């Protein structure tokens, strides 16, 4: 008999164990090994059975065991000591507190998903895991971030695989009372709520859950409350569930409701409203509109409020393909904003922010990423290559500018080392190298022997094998209750065989089945007598992506062949708990997307932190950090005639690398059984990649390169009752109105002979018509450098030209007899010819203002012709 309703009853702890409650509800336990070990001491069997979730564990332990622990002085002392350690961690100054004055007092970090721990399943994949790691490292570094997201009652989905290999989805309903959450409340105890006005006189209410992530507070908005009618209670039903209007409602709640939740938090606690707002992907972009609405209500015009919001907003794009961006019909957006949702903002003003009104854009379409870029003065991709791809993809927003000048930088993702590095590697770093973390250890030191390092890596592989066998057995039991699992499950994988891992979301561009391109060759690799290989695969396809599901089915069917079924396995329900065994347990991490469609690829980072070597297409982070010793690069067949030929060439390269380089190196053992050359690559990987791949490095970059400059810009435009914003908005309006009349009618040059030589100086004088503008409103530059076909400048450099004596051509008519020069302002300067070969130059004019973050910001440029 099934219950008609279920809920979680929290245990009442003995007074001497009260510290356990706080330790369980602050998610620092998810990356703090001593705290996890304490909970495991309560009951190792129950700890594993509940998925290593402290709150679930405390709900499973009977009163007798709790009383026994309460009487155990050592356990009580250990519990209180860990609580003291947590309190010190929460209070003590950290890296951020050592920075000079001027850092943001508070930063709002908005994301549609947060992957922090398996115990809080509010994530689907890389975007959420990245957001979770961002919060964890911000906590460790003392960065005052407040996270904002949604609480999905069914999370993403639980994956199972049918007997015929087809992915099946289940959406278990989560009970918030069984999760590490608390409700934000008013002083009278009532739950604080955000409210959004919707079309048809409907109203959306959401309560605000709080999550403690170390020092960081995460707010999650939840619409499954009695104040909403049934249709609106389901707004936060599933992560990435539904589409169209349902997705729009989620994103309105995340952005607009998220800012309102922050205002409630500031009102009800000592938290400060953020100075800087970070939009992690376009889903949260509406946050800028709520802020504009508040500023307009305070007396600014829309244009002035936009400048304030832009100055303090950072926008991160994660997608390398237009199809990955949320887009809505303009009519739907107009319907929602022709309400009291944002009374100070008109629907037309909203539509203009997301309009694809540029070359190649689609009319009557509202683009969330485009709005994010227009609302954020600073933007970035998530690897160097992805930054380049993003500048090209969004370049139409800045017509006339070179791709490299498009104002989208990059901050390469990182991963949170304490979460993703196996505890045994931490222990080895501490015991033999005296390092607090593996990232700070000298892995090249002889203090740690090859034998010790190899034994740690072997232990990781053994734990993966045990975990894989447990998972497939559990999946069998769930689908075949009462029937014993096949005997060969006990032989699944071999802890002594070279193990390759592949796990990620399963869109087609990630090419899950590239390894199956030549099934017989793969079979021979797996079953090699001399150099056997085994492959562990995991990943979820979006529920609506049947093509992705077919890829999973193909791989499952291949892996079930009796000849190779112990050498290849697909593990269902890929999540954080699985990943923490999978990444350390693999010797090689495989990644073979279609270049350049992998924005970053953080799964390979997590493997590398554990000494695993990467085998990857040169895409995402691997394109910038591969050095020929930390793994292998699969050559990209970019010039292939079609997709089939490209797959064939790249698959063959992958097979060749495994057969002729990877496996031979792995099995080249010394008399002690240790693969010395392989361990050398492990040492190199740990030494060179651990600091670079750390989320601490990533968060420091965000602080220094984006958050601090954004805070300075926001303060500059907000000073003196927003005088800077008013000035900037008026200046932009004046420049935009005058720009069609700006021109460079004439350019003169001299100083070089008919046969220019290296070291000569080229003198340039440009005549610029500035009808309606002053010389201080513009930056006049000579662009110069090598020339290619069609006289195109290649990687041009820019030298500023200065106004000459403040004179116009009218005052010096003897210098030119061109009629269209009349009234033009003269600008001059010089360029040294510092390289031989083809050389060319041109003159350009762009707007200039001290509050612009980039010369390209307005998308306005005039070239000499």
Image (cartoon, helix red, strand yellow):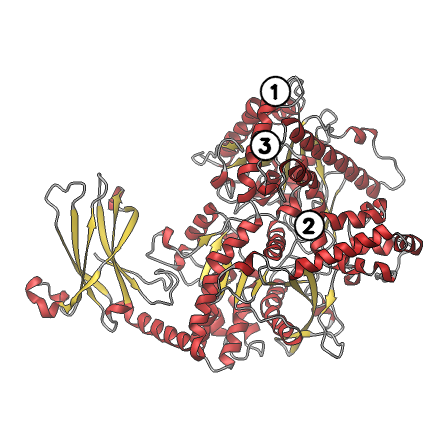
N-terminal label among 3 and 2:
2
N-terminal label among 3 and 1:
1
Question: Residue 185, relative to residue 217: is it above or below?
Answer: below
Cα distance between the residues tagged 3 and 2 = 23 Å
**Residue lying farthest to the left in this orientation:** 814
Return the x and y of residue 689 as percentages of the image width and height. 54, 40
Cα distance between the residues tagged 2 and 1 = 36 Å
> In the image shown, does 78 or 370 lie closer to the viewer?
78
The secondary structure type at the circle numbered 3 is: helix
Determine which of the numbered discs, if any, sits on residue 31 in the image: 2
Q: Quadrant of residue 474?
A: top right
Residue pointed to by mark 3: 682
Q: Quadrant of the C terminus?
A: bottom left
Mark 3 is surrounded, within 10 Å at the Cα level, by few (under 14), some (14 to 19) or many (20 or more) other residues, namely many
In the picture, measured across the screen, residue 788 lies left or right of residue 107, that is: left
Return the x and y of residue 779 as percentages of the image width and height. 27, 62
> In the image shown, does 596 or 610 lie closer to the viewer?
610
Image point (57%, 24%), residue name: 677
Image point (37%, 51%), residue name: 403
Mark 1 is surrounded, within 10 Å at the Cα level, by few (under 14), some (14 to 19) or many (20 or more) other residues, namely some
In the picture, measured across the screen, residue 761 lies left or right of residue 608, that is: left
The secondary structure type at the circle numbered 2 is: loop
The secondary structure type at the circle numbered 1 is: loop
Residue 696 in view: yes
Residue pointed to by mark 1: 668
């Amino acid at each position: 008999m099934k219950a008609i309703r279920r809920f979680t009853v929290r245990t009442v702890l003995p007074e001497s164990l009260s510290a356990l409650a706080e330790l369980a509800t602050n998610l620092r336990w998810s990356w703090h090994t001593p705290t996890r070990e304490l909970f495991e001491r309560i009951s190792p069997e129950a700890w594993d059975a509940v998925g290593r979730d402290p709150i679930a564990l405390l709900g499973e332990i009977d009163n007798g065991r709790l009383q026994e622990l309460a009487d155990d002085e050592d356990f009580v002392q250990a519990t209180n000591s860990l609580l003291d350690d947590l309190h010190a961690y929460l209070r003590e100054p950290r890296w951020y507190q050592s920075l000079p004055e001027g850092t943001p007092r508070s930063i709002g970090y908005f994301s549609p998903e947060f992957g922090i721990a398996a115990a809080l399943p509010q994530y689907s994949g890389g975007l959420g895991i990245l957001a979770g790691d961002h919060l964890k490292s911000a906590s460790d570094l003392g960065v005052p971030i407040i996270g904002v997201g949604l609480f999905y009652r069914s999370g993403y989905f639980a994956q199972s695989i049918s007997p015929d290999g087809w992915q099946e989805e289940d959406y278990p309903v989560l009970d918030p009372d069984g999760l590490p959450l608390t409700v934000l409340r008013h002083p009278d105890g009532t739950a604080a709520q955000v409210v959004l006005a919707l079309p048809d006189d409907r109203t959306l209410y959401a309560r605000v859950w709080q999550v403690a992530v170390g020092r960081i507070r995460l707010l999650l908005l939840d619409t499954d409350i009695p104040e909403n009618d049934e249709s609106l209670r389901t707004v936060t039903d599933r992560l990435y569930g539904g589409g169209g209007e349902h997705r729009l409602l989620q994103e309105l709640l995340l952005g607009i409701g998220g800012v309102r939740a922050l205002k409630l938090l500031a009102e009800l606690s000592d938290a400060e409203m953020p100075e800087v707002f970070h939009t992690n992907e376009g889903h949260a972009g509406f946050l800028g509109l709520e802020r504009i609405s508040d500023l307009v209500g305070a007396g600014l015009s829309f244009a002035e409020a936009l400048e304030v919001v832009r100055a303090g907003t950072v926008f991160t794009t994660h997608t390398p393909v237009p199809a990955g961006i949320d887009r809505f019909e303009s009519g739907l957006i107009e319907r929602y904003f022709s309400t009291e949702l944002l009374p100070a903002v008109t629907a037309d003003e909203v539509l203009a922010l997301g309009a694809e009104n540029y070359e190649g854009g689609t009319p009557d379409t509202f683009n969330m990423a485009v709005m994010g870029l227009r609302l954020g003065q600073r933007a970035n991709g998530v690897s160097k290559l992805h930054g380049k791809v993003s500048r090209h993809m969004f370049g139409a927003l800045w017509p006339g500018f070179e791709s490299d000048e498009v104002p989208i930088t990059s901050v390469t993702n990182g991963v949170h080392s304490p979460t993703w590095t196996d505890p045994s590697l931490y222990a080895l770093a501490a015991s033999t190298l005296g390092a607090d973390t593996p990232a700070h250890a000298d892995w090249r030191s002889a203090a740690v022997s090859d034998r010790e390092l190899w034994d740690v890596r072997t232990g990781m592989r053994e734990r993966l094998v045990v975990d894989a066998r447990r998972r497939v057995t559990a999946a069998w039991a769930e689908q075949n209750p009462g029937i014993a699992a096949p005997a060969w499950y006990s032989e699944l994988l071999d802890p002594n065989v070279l193990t390759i891992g592949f796990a990620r979301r399963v869109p087609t561009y990630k090419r899950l089945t590239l390894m199956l391109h030549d099934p017989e060759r793969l079979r021979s690799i797996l079953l090699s007598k001399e150099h056997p290989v085994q492959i562990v695969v995991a990943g979820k396809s979006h529920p609506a992506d049947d093509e992705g599901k077919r890829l999973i089915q193909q791989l499952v069917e291949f892996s079930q062949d009796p000849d190779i079924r112990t050498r290849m396995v697909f593990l269902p329900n890929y999540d954080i708990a699985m990943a923490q065994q999978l990444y350390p347990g693999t010797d090689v991490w495989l990644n073979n997307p279609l270049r350049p469609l992998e924005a970053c690829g953080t799964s390979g980072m997590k493997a590398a932190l554990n000494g695993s070597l990467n085998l990857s297409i040169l895409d995402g982070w691997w394109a910038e950090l591969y050095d020929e010793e930390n793994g292998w690069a699969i050559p990209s067949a970019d010039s292939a005639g079609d997709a089939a030929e490209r797959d064939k060439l790249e698959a063959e390269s992958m097979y060749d690398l495994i057969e002729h380089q990877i496996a031979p190196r792995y099995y080249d053992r010394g008399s002690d059984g240790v693969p010395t050359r392989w361990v050398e690559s492990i040492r190199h990987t740990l030494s060179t990649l651990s600091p670079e791949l750390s989320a601490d490095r990533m968060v420091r970059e965000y602080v220094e390169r984006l958050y601090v400059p954004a805070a300075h810009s926001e303060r500059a435009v907000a000073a003196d009752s927003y005088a800077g914003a008013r000035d900037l908005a008026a200046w932009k309006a004046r420049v935009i109105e005058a720009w069609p009349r700006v021109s460079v009618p004439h350019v003169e040059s001299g100083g070089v002979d008919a046969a220019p030589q290296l070291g000569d100086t080229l003198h340039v004088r440009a005549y610029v018509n500035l009808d309606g503008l002053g010389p201080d409103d513009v930056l006049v530059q000579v662009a110069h450098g090598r020339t290619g076909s069609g006289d195109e400048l290649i990687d041009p450099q820019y030298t500023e030209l200065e106004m000459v004596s403040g004179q116009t051509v009218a005052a010096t008519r003897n210098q030119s007899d061109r009629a269209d020069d009349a009234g033009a302002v003269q600008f001059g300067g010089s360029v040294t010819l510092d390289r031989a070969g083809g050389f060319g130059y041109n003159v350009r004019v762009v707007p200039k203002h001290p509050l612009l973050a980039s010369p390209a910001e307005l998308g306005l440029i005039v070239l000499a012709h």
